Image (tube, rainbow, N blue to C red):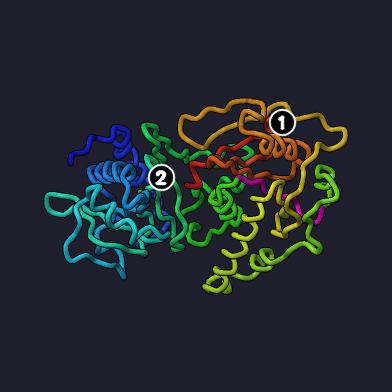
Amino acid sequence: MTYGTYSAGQALAGRVRDRFARDLDAARLAGVVNLAPVPPIELIDAVVDAAFWTSLRREEVYVPKISLAMLPRESTSRALVFERPLPLVPPALARVAPAVERPGIHLGVWPEGDGVWVWGTTRVLPKYCLVLEVAAPGLLVVKQQRGGDQTKYGNVAVLEGEQVKFVDENASSLPDCPSLLTSLLGFDAPASWGDSLNVLVQLSVSMRAHGRGGLLLVVPAGTNTWRDSIVTPILYEQSPPFSGLSELMRQNLEHRQDHGWQDDLNRNVEMIAGLTAVDGATLLTDSYHLLAFGAKIARRRGSPPVEQVTVTEPIEGGEAAVVHPTELGGTRHLSAAQFVYDQRNAVALVASQDGRFTVFAWSPCEDMVHAHRVEALLL
């Protein structure tokens, strides 16, 4: 069977390689070691093309979900190496997909001789290693490994059908950019990537993953002004506020290196993200105390209804637009925008059932609510 050329991928390889090489130069200047080699343009092009056609196949009714890491086998340790490398073709990738679909397992791909081959699997990647993930049929994500923590990745580009979105490296330097967006982008100092941890990022990923839609309101600790925008009584208010996540985040760096700590963190994140699937809003302080879930948002007394928000997406070529909140979604988006309009020190995270994800924050520069569309960063 022959396959056509994935035209969107042809425009991607050169730009990805140029950005990758530029990032490697910056990392070397910052003193980062154990860096991945720069993949040839032909390799990036071949991996994107093979991954796209693989995403459209079915292996016993399942969609192949694979992660392809572009590195030679000498660049990693504790790898599972095939005696006979697999050809980089959709049938071979689809057949092996069930063995590597769990998070953190990558198929290693690199040119050898006159072809490109899948030489085995690995969980350990050198820093900055370029990775391509098949997220859904026709949906591919190009990522970079960003530090010692193997779960820390930054998205470089998203390909959906014929549409290519490059993540804007400068988006985190825009005025009023919330810290959550900065962490999602991952474009802070390279030396800090290995130690970075943002619980709101993990909550966002988990909220999006449960697929039911959800709303998380993050409010300042030690204040009760948020109650002015919530219908009382709150059916699922916590008394006292649940502090499991907060206690974990107060532990020092030494404790955080323990696998038990990470497991506890994951369980708490999954639990709180699961609460957002309940109709209404989940309330969390910025010190990670859980206040309530299933809460109903109401316009603060004396406050006008929110009529417009600025909406942006952190991708190259994206332009800001001013729209009514209902143009972003339904009641959940309107309620989130109203809450942030009335509670300007708060941030609202909204997951849609269709996978869209929006972060609402107040922008003093624009004097209005700013809606950041960030689903491209959560894939």
* Residue lying farthest to the left in this orientation: 114
Where residue 139 appears, as percent x and y from the top left, is 40, 41
Horizontal arrangement in the rendering, residue 40 relative to residue 203 (left or right):
left
Q: Residues within 10 Å of mark 2 (few under 14, many from 20)?
A: some
Q: Let me know if residue 352 appears in the view.
A: yes
Q: Secondary structure at mark 2?
A: strand
**Which residue carries the number 1 mark?**
367
Where residue 314 appears, as percent x and y from the top left, is 51, 37
- Residue that appears at 52% across and 62% down: 195
Where residue 117 appears, as percent x and y from the top left, is 20, 54
Q: Amino acid at mark 2?
A: Ala
Q: Secondary structure at mark 1?
A: loop
- Residue that appears at 81% across and 42% down: 229
* Residue lying farthest to the right in this orientation: 302
Horizontal arrangement in the rendering, residue 153 relative to residue 89 (left or right):
right
Q: Is 354 above or below relative to 263?
A: above
Residue 301 position by quadrant: top right
Q: Is residue 251 magenta?
A: no
Q: Distance between the Cα atoms at labels 1 and 2?
A: 38 Å
Count of labels in the image: 2
**Which residue carries the number 2 mark?**
136
Q: Is 244 above or below relative to 311?
A: below
Horizontal arrangement in the rendering, residue 21 relative to residue 190 (left or right):
left
- Residue that appears at 21% across and 38% down: 3
Where residue 230 appears, as percent x and y from the top left, is 81, 45
Q: In this orientation, which residue lies closer to the viewer: 11 or 80?
A: 80
The residue segment tinted magenta is: 213-223
Q: Residues within 10 Å of mark 1 (few under 14, many from 20)?
A: few
Mark earlier in primary sequence (1, 2): 2
- Residue that appears at 63% across and 30% down: 310
